[in-house]
Amino acid sequence: MSEVLRAITERSSTRGYKKDKIAPEILEQLIQAGLEAPTAANKQEIHFSVIDGEAAVLQEIEDEKNRGFGLEQAPPNNFYYDAPTVIIISGDKNFSWSELDAGIAVENIAIAAQALGLGSLIIGCVKNALRGEKEAEFAEKLGYPEGYEYKIAIALGYKAVTKEPHTYEYEKQVTIVK
């Protein structure tokens, strides 16, 4: 099995990270993997906001997420499970393929993280928080280009917990048309 296929097969969502920071050269490889993802019409309209896991803005996003879900008490884990790095991908609000392009990029990053011995968690649960009442405030804090909005995020770091990759039912999930 090729290394790429092995990374895809072995990857699972990580919901617990060590405190160790990702080395700058490894983080650069992850960003590069995201940038190398194809985009519709080669528009390259997605943007990566790379956030240190200790940045105050992550707690602000967590608080807004919880408020939006009507939670009176915070859940036991924050949305990024205390990962040392979070990348939020934004895209052009007016380009209908930005969400798909961001999804391709985040998957590239997740596979690259697995291949580099890191864990990852693809995150969608903050969408309402980042596109709600405080959208402009968060966009500014996260350095989005003008006219961009949240599309998807990914938490990254060294695994403190492990989980088996998900299972699937090939016969139920695949139809081959000839």
Image (cartoon, rainbow, N blue to C red):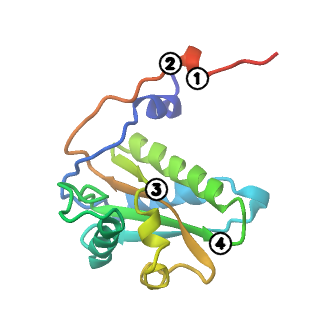
Q: Amino acid at mark 4?
A: Lys
Q: Which residue is mark 4?
A: 93
Numbered tag placed on residue 169 in the rendering = 2
Q: Vertical placement of 154 versus 56: above or below? A: above
For this rendering, which residue is in front, 149 or 55? Answer: 149
- Residues at marks 1 and 2 touching, judged by CB atoms closer than 8 Å: yes
Identify the residue at horizontal 45%, vertical 71% (top origin): 130
For this rendering, which residue is in front, 7 or 126? Answer: 126
Closer to the eye: label 3 or 1:
1
Identify the residue at horizontal 24%, vertical 36% (top origin): 162
- Residues at marks 3 and 1 touching, judged by CB atoms closer than 8 Å: no
Identify the residue at horizontal 48%, vertical 51% (top origin): 109
Residue 135 percent coordinates (x, y): 48, 79
Closer to the eye: label 3 or 2:
2
Question: In the displayed structure, does residue 15 sit left or right of residue 108?
Answer: left
For this rendering, which residue is in front, 156 or 127? Answer: 127
